[in-house]
Image (tube, helix red, strand yellow):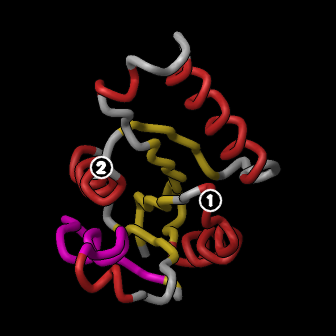
């Protein structure tokens, strides 16, 4: 059983969120904790200058609302919203917070994933802990 479980959730691909959370709960040790992490891609400076003032903050607030709505009634799951590149940020977060299991969903890989790599593949290759991937 695992004490600290990280569940990365992409709000635009949240179809498996309930299943992933159920797996995390089943693998959680007594007294363990589950953190749902959503990564908001950083907006490059050359793009940000053309956006309305406060757009990044507004986007983060919308993502927080979305993750809260998704986790409504899940009092045993802590929600976090961070910025960065999804694969790198998930691995860094897991290392900094002594996560001992990452449970995440993955889509079936397409041709573009073989050239660029999916977020789940990147996390599996670089995570400092066990990774359970739901397909």
Q: Quadrant of the N terminus?
A: bottom left
Residue 83 sits above or below residue 110 on the image = above
Q: In what element is the residue under mark 1?
A: helix
Residue 20 sits above or below residue 77 on the image = below
The residue pinned by badge 1 equals: 12
Classed neighbour count for the residue bearing mark 1: other residues with Cα under 10 Å, few (<14), some (14–19), many (≥20): few
The verdict on residue 121 being magenta is: yes
Q: Please name which of the two marks, 2 or 1, marks the residue nearer to the observer.
A: 1
Which residue is pictured at 65% across the width and 75% down the height?
Answer: 16
- Which numbered disc flags the more N-terminal residue, 2 or 1? 1
Q: Is residue 46 left or right of residue 54?
A: left
**Residue 111: quarter of image:** bottom left
Picture coordinates of residue 76, whole percent (x, y): 66, 52
The verdict on residue 123 being magenta is: yes
Which residue is pictured at 58% across the width and 43% down the height?
Answer: 79
What mark, if any, has residue 35 been given in the picture? none
The residue pinned by badge 2 equals: 89
Which residue is pictured at 79% across the width and 48% down the height?
Answer: 72
Picture coordinates of residue 8, whole percent (x, y): 48, 59
Q: CA distance from mark 2 to mark 1?
A: 17 Å
Q: Nearer the viewer, residue 112 or 129?
A: 112
Q: In what element is the residue under mark 2?
A: helix
Picture coordinates of residue 119, whole percent (x, y): 35, 68
Extent of the magenta region: 116-133
Residue at far top of view: 53
Q: Nearer the viewer, residue 77 or 10?
A: 10
Residue at far front of view: 50
Picture coordinates of residue 27, whole percent (x, y): 51, 76
**Residue 61: quarter of image:** top right
Q: Is residue 95 left or right of residue 79?
A: left
């Amino acid at each position: 059983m695992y004490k600290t479980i990280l569940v990365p959730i992409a709000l635009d691909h949240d179809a498996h969120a309930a299943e992933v959370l159920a797996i995390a709960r089943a693998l959680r040790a007594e007294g363990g904790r589950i953190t749902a992490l959503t990564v908001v891609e950083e907006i490059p400076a050359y793009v940000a200058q053309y956006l309305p003032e406060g757009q990044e903050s507004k986007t983060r607030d919308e993502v927080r609302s979305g993750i809260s709505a998704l986790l409504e009634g899940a009092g045993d799951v802590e929600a976090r919203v961070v910025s960065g590149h999804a694969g790198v940020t998930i691995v860094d977060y897991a290392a900094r917070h002594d996560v001992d299991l990452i449970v995440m969903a993955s889509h079936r890989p397409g041709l573009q994933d073989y050239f660029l790599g999916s977020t789940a593949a990147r996390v599996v290759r670089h995570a400092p802990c066990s990774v359970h991937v739901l397909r």
